Amino acid sequence: KVWKRVQPRIGRIPVRVDLSAVSFVDDQGKDVLTAMQQGGAELVATGPLMTALVEEITQSCRSQAGNSSPPQPKAAGTAATPTRGLP
């Protein structure tokens, strides 16, 4: 309820939702996090469970926005390099 009241007031102010201390999210919580992300909030997670949840929400939001094939993430510190055929 709070997000629905606050979101229109904050406009373009960046919102970051830190989930690093969260160990479980029920279906209602997932719905709230999805609405927050759709409203422009950045979801930040650590740990495998919350990271997977944030990725799932992100993919769901992209699919609903018509972008069903998001770019593949790269490992930190890697750069795209052209591939060459073997001689």
Image (cartoon, rainbow, N blue to C red):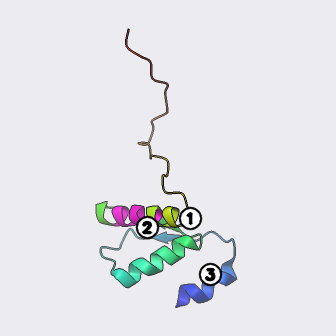
The residue identified by callout 2 is 57
> Mark 3: few, some, or many residues within 10 Å (few <14, many ≥20)?
some
Can see residue 1?
A: yes
Residue picked out by circle 1: 65
Q: Is residue 54 magenta?
A: yes
Determine whether 9 is above or below 65 in the image: below
The part of the chain drawn in magenta is 50-58
Q: Indicate which disc residue 43 carries.
A: none
Tell me the kind of residue under disc 1: Ala
In the rendered structure, are the residues bearing label 2 and label 3 in contact, judged by CB atoms less than 8 Å apart? no
Q: Nearer the viewer, mark 2 or mark 1?
A: 1
Q: Describe the element under mark 2 as helix, strand or loop.
A: helix
Mark 3 lies on a secondary structure that is: helix
Measured Cα–Cα span from mark 1 to mark 3: 19 Å
Q: Residue at x 57, y 87 (%)?
A: 4
> As displayed, is residue 11 above or below residue 66?
below
Which tag, 1 or 3, sits closer to the chain's start?
A: 3
Label 1 Cα neighbours within 10 Å, binned few <14 / some 14-19 / many ≥20: few
- Decide if residue 51 is on the left or right side of residue 68: left
- Residue depicted at 39% across the width and 84% down the height: 28
Q: Is residue 59 above or below residue 26?
A: above
Instruction: Tell me the amino acid under the disc marked 2.
Output: Ile
Residue 81 relative to residue 51: left or right: right
Q: Position of residue 75 (x, y in %)?
A: 41, 42
Of all residues, the one furthest to the top in this rendering is 87
Question: Disc 1 or disc 3, which is closer to the eye?
Answer: 1
Labels 2 and 1: the sequence-earlier one: 2
Q: Residue at x 37, y 13 (%)?
A: 86
Which of discs 2 and 3 lies nearer the camera? The answer is 2
From the top left corner, tell me how far across and down residue 59 is, in percent.
45, 61
Query: Dot 3 corresponds to which residue?
Result: 7
Q: Position of residue 45 (x, y in %)?
A: 40, 64
